[in-house]
Image (cartoon, rainbow, N blue to C red):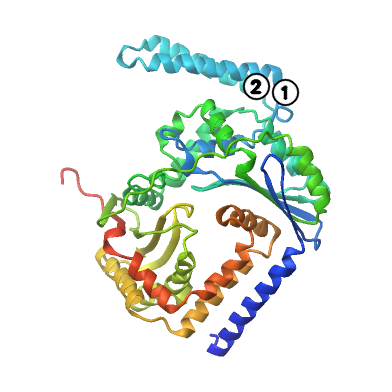
Amino acid sequence: MWDMRRIAFAALFITCAFAQDLKEFEKRVTEFTLKNGLHFIIVERHEAPVVSFHTYINAGAVDDPNGKTGVAHMFEHMAFKGTEAIGSKNIVAEKRALANIEKVYDELDQEKRKGPTADKTRVGELEKKLKDAIETANSYVDSELYTRILEESGENGLNASTAPDATRYFYSLPSNRLELWYLMESDRFLHPVFREFYKERDVVREEKRMRVESSPNGRLFEILLAGAFEGHPYKNPPAAFSSDIENLRVGDAERFMKTYYVPGNMTIAIVGDIDPKECRRLAEQYFGPMVPAPLPPGVITVEPQQEGERRVTMQSPAQPLFIVGYKRPDQNHADDAVFDVIDGIVSGGRTGWMYQEMVEKSQTALAVDTGSGLPGGKYPNLYAFMALPNSGKTIDDFEKGVYEIIDRLKKETIDETTMKRVKTKVRASVIRQLGSNPGLAAELTRYHVSYGDWRMLFRSVEEIDKVSAADVQRVAKQYFIDKTRTVAYHVKPTKEGQ
């Protein structure tokens, strides 16, 4: 355990080093925006002959249209299916077959919309015709060719993610494959082909089934959001509504792409053994042809003010979980750093208050945690306290323990030793993110989009250092209040008829 002098020295060292590092770091950064609005952040790191790429789209599940939840995720899947030049055995025949799928699907939809008067025989015929049309189109696909090309070129970490606020595409390559990335990445946004869409739709539906529907904790989290948010699309399941997924069409994904995958809504970071001048030349060559377009609209619905506690429960025979979420402001609010410090105080591992009080002392809980910025941070969101109650303990026992921790935040002035320890840990976690090329590329794009300047990644350390014990107390009193909280937990299933 560090004594106070060692903690103070470490805090001072990290703060001074970070300020100095920003000046040095800026010397290795080249930043430019193409005429079409696409922004690049290039960082030279010549320690190893590798380079990491991170493409950040400022759109995610929160931007899914009503009735089309899951469409942002669907396009992410489509982006790995190849292009006109990559992934087809016969692009002319394939495009013709893909158009035929949509024609038959339209006919099927029209018949089904007749409701009770729909011709069941006709529906059956069209369903068979649709299946045959899909099989025909799929026969032209050179499956996984897009990813195989990258794998054979030495890629590492090829993946993507769709979050509520953003969609990300990322991987690393040997530095002598730099131009290959430019070719492959630009082509999938310039000339996408929505091949195997309905096959991939089944994959997305299965992901929902496995990760959420088969997970009591995943379902409870969805129920928490639905209870906490009344109007804002953060209320929608991050993994989408199952019925929406099952009815998504190619046109839905095409419209989403045309609206949100515009150059001005995209940011790319390239970090590694590269020449910035060559990066810019290739950017102009490969991404320059992307047509500029208006920035997409943001979410216009403002969540109505919550005027009373909300409670939601879910029957489950599984290990019970308890979550209490409080409304908090978005990531650009001046109090954002205070919530980070509160995280460190309350749930910072074995030194956190929740662990010490509820796991070790009272043994109310088996495990505890907190989460800030749920489900995303772009808009006002939730700060949540979570735990698995211990055997023989009730939800009431745990709920009481959580509120005692919150009351302590409101009434107790955090001592200087705790504040310095927490700040050192928070700052160290920020610094660790910069250690790898992929981690740095991810954070640079996120901070550029979320805060308007990638330098906020470094300045966030200064914001943490400014947080005082009085700030912690003020924020706890202001935001952790009864009328803005939503409580969600599992209850044992009742017998039939009860």
Tell me what residue is drawn at x 31 percent, y 51 percent: 316
| Residue where numbered disc 2 is placed | 139
Rendering coords of residue 456 (x, y %): 60, 63
Q: Nearer the viewer, residue 123 or 271?
A: 271
Q: Nearer the viewer, residue 315 or 253?
A: 253
Q: Is residue 9 above or below residue 180?
A: below
- Residue kind at label 1, given as amino acid type: Lys
Q: Nearer the viewer, residue 96 or 271?
A: 271
Does the rendering let one see residue 152?
A: no
Tell me what residue is drawn at x 65 percent, y 72 percent: 18
Neighbourhood count class around disc 2 (C-alpha, 10 Å): few under 14, some 14–19, many 20 upward: some
Does the rendering let one see residue 150?
A: yes
* Left or right: 102 as drawn, with respect to 139: left
Tell me what residue is drawn at x 60 percent, y 34 percent: 78
Q: Nearer the viewer, residue 127 or 283?
A: 283
Rendering coords of residue 127 (x, y %): 47, 17
| CA distance separating discs 2 and 1 | 8 Å
Q: Quadrant of residue 213?
A: top left
**For numbered disc 1, what is the local secondary structure?**
loop
* Residue contact between numbered discs 2 and 1, judged by CB atoms under 8 Å: yes
- Residue kind at label 2, given as amino acid type: Ser
Rendering coords of residue 338 (x, y %): 46, 69
| Residue where numbered disc 1 is placed | 89
Tell me what residue is drawn at x 68 percent, y 65 percent: 435
Q: Is residue 411 above or below residue 282?
A: below
